[in-house]
Image (cartoon, rainbow, N blue to C red):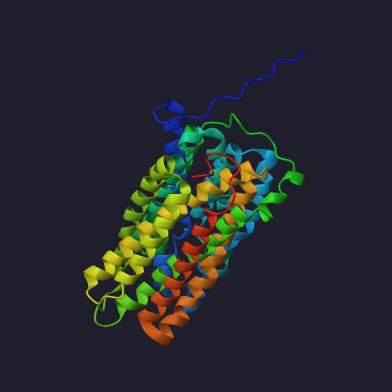
Amino acid sequence: MQTAIATPPGYRPGEAGYRRLSVALFAAGLATFAMLYSTQPLLPELVTAFDISPSQSAFSVSFATLGLGIALLIAGPASERLGRTKLMRWSVAAAAVIAVLCTVAPTWHVLLALRGVQGIALAGLPAVAMAYLREEVHEDSHARASGLYIAGTALGGMTGRLIGGGLADLGGWRTALGGIAVLGLVCAALVAFLLPSSRNFSPSPTRRNRAVLTDPGLLALYGISAAAMGAFVAVYNATGFRLAAAPYDLGPGPAGLVFTVYVVGSAASAIAGRLADRYGRRAVVPIGCLITMGGVAITLASPLPLVVAGLAVMTAGFFAVHGVASGWVAVRAHAVGGGTAQAASLYLFAYYLGSSVFGGLAGTAWSHSAWPGVAVEAGVLFGVTLVLALALRRVPSRNAKLAG
């Protein structure tokens, strides 16, 4: 007669395992998004170094995000059978090694190829991080843990841009990418040594994963991801043009400092996670949507301090929404009997699809109507996000936690 093996309880705040998990995933998120956006502040340098056009230089970012988006659809389902921790560890490590290779790329086409491969390698972390948290963290602390991970991604996006821009002024684009590569290697080491191995993972048969494409709650969360990220990227894509034009006339260096408001987003994500644990996800996400819309409205003012303040408010609201919604996806998918990693991958696929489509439309909005046009685009998208968040309040929950 076989004896049933009890499932280990999830890690709780204050426990050594929770601390190791939190530090490891914070480092993983930091490295992933620092490396993903590492070339964004270097585009003028790449134009000169490889004798290419500005539009061509942007491919160094889009190739990485495209590789990431496509690979997400593969990495998530694969982890349902292969496991979580091994994929996350190898993802960050492989991406860091490729980052080193990028610093010595001899030609433009080699650099583009490496960036595409790097995006593919990076997919292993975001594709399964939320599913891993859902399985390994106690249900009372899911939102708090996911908020901390999203905080790491927020700081990563800021760090990649700031370190890249600063080092480029000192030694050119290769030095800049080298600095990001060192950061990636350090974070990969932290993930390898600190990330606890899965204790509660069990393979999920493919036949059980259809719910990730049919559940109305998950579909609403995917829509929130696409609309919110599209609006967020649209605003930041157009901000560079606005700050370079009159009456601000800022150069790339000073204009790049606007990304320091990502610190606000990092804090907001962690705070929103705690509030969601206390008051429920269904209450916190709509409030985050309202904050984003308020931030966009503030940016319509002309004084530079108000523009920056508006960006900070919008950033706080966006990361509050994303931090809670991304963790909600894994919990919802588990409750409806689907694959949590598959659902997380689809959420992130929608995230990068929204970034590509709506972020690109920001240039058209700027050309036709300057900043008011961009603000209208972002306001409409954040409005759609709010409608979907409110619709989620009417979607039947599958357990007490989902009831919010």
State whether residue 147 is above or below residue 378. Answer: above
Q: Position of residue 153 (x, y in %)?
A: 44, 51
- Residue 94 visible within the image: no
x 44%, y 49%: residue: 150
Which quarter of the picture shows residue 346?
bottom right
- Looking at this view, name the residue that lies furthest to the top: 1
Q: Position of residue 203 (x, y in %)?
A: 70, 37
Q: How many marks?
A: 0
For the N terminus, which image quadrant? top right
x 36%, y 63%: residue: 314
Q: Position of residue 358 (x, y in %)?
A: 51, 72
Q: Nearer the viewer, residue 359 or 89?
A: 359
State whether residue 399 is above or below residue 370. Answer: above
- Residue 188 visible within the image: yes
x 60%, y 53%: residue: 218
Q: Nearer the viewer, residue 14 or 392?
A: 392
Q: Nearer the viewer, residue 396 or 38?
A: 396
State whether residue 229 is above or below residue 195. Answer: below
- Looking at this view, name the residue that lies furthest to the bottom: 368
Which quarter of the picture shows residue 276?
top left
x 66%, y 20%: residue: 5
Q: Position of residue 103 (x, y in %)?
A: 47, 58
